[in-house]
């Protein structure tokens, strides 16, 4: 199944009651990738696209040069049932060209620094990194505020897409941004991890010992029943760099160094 067929299938799934009940933004196109997954050797992995990829701080749809991805409005459609090949091409191009437009840099630059020393990047003419999500649908409510049943529905309804994309790609390393990503990947994937405490990644707390840091390494073979046809290396850490409270520059630099060094070992 190529990218256009994957996207077309995702649009058809949008009408399912389970996705409507899971707080999916129905007028927003699914995001199969941030950047070109098919030319990448590194992929960062998150939970699902932020609503801020589609709306501003006031909740209004992004328009003009601020727009990042397509919506029913931007495509001039009343419903996704009206989608034609030309619309699919536009949606896919917005995914491939994400980092050439108006990327959410306040989020992605923190991830970019993780592997830039390994010679990979989201940005530029020769970009060879992308971002993927476990679920390609943006939701009105942040992942952590969704109910257990809503999260389960999102993973079961669309978790296979990650496997379909990776199977066609040449991605060698997937970087898992935080404990929640690691735990939710385990739900839909055939993977195992080695978990190692890292003393230098401890997050300080005034009234307690602190929040311990852990490094995760593993291999990925199957996702939601999709055989990747190879093993993909997994590198993860339990602190979410953008949202974990108290992530110091020292901890961030330590994680960056470990990710870059580990990725270079895979590439070699």
Image (spheres, rainbow, N blue to C red):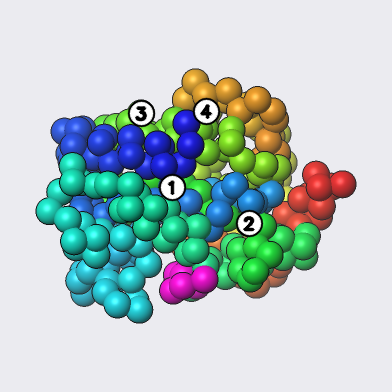
Separation of marks 1 and 2 at Cα, in angstroms? 14 Å
Callout 3: few (<14), some (14-19), or many (20+) C-alpha neighbours within 10 Å?
some
Residue 101 counted in the magenta span: yes
Image label count? 4
Residue that badge 1 annotates: 32
Disc 4, disc 3: CB below 8 Å?
no
Please say whether residue 145 is visible from this viewpoint: no
Q: Mark 3 or mark 1, which is nearer the start of the sequence?
A: 1
The picture places residue 153, in percent across and down from the top left corner, at 29, 32
Question: In this figure, which residue is indicated by the disc labeled 3?
Answer: 156
How far is the residue under mark 4 from the one under mark 3?
Answer: 11 Å
Of pointers 1 and 2, the one earlier in the residue sequence? 1
* Residue 101 pos. (x, y %): 46, 72
Label 4 and label 1: CA atoms lie apart by 15 Å
Disc 1 and disc 2 in contact, CB within 8 angstroms: no
Return the residue at label 2.
129
Local SS, label 2 = strand
Q: Which residue is mark 4?
A: 223
Q: Distance of mark 2 from mark 4, alpha carbons?
A: 20 Å
Magenta segment, which residues? 100-105
């Amino acid at each position: 199944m190529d990218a256009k067929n994957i996207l077309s299938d995702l649009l058809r799934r949008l009408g399912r009651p389970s996705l409507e009940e899971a707080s999916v933004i129905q007028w927003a196109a699914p995001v199969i990738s941030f950047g070109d997954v098919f030319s990448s050797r590194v992929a960062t992995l998150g939970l699902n696209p932020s609503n801020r990829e589609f709306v501003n701080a006031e909740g209004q749809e992004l328009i003009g040069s601020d727009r990042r991805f397509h919506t029913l409005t931007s495509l001039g459609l009343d419903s996704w049932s009206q989608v034609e090949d030309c619309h699919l091409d536009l949606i896919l191009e917005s995914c491939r060209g994400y980092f050439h437009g108006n990327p959410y840099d306040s989020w992605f630059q923190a991830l970019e620094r993780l592997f830039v020393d390994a010679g990979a990047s989201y940005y530029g003419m020769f970009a060879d990194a992308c971002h993927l999500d476990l679920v390609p649908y943006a939701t009105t409510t942040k992942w952590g505020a969704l109910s257990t049943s809503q999260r389960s529905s999102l993973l079961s309804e669309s978790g296979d897409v990650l496997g379909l994309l990776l199977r066609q790609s040449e991605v060698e390393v997937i970087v898992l941004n935080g404990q929640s990503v690691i735990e939710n990947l385990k739900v839909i994937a055939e993977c195992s991890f080695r978990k190692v405490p890292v003393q230098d990644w401890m997050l300080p707390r005034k009234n307690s010992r602190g929040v311990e840091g852990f490094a995760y390494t593993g291999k990925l073979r199957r996702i939601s029943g999709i055989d990747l046809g190879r093993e993909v290396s997994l590198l993860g850490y339990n602190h979410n760099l953008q949202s974990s409270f108290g992530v110091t520059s020292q901890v961030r630099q330590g994680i960056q160094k470990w990710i870059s060094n580990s990725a270079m070992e895979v590439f070699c």
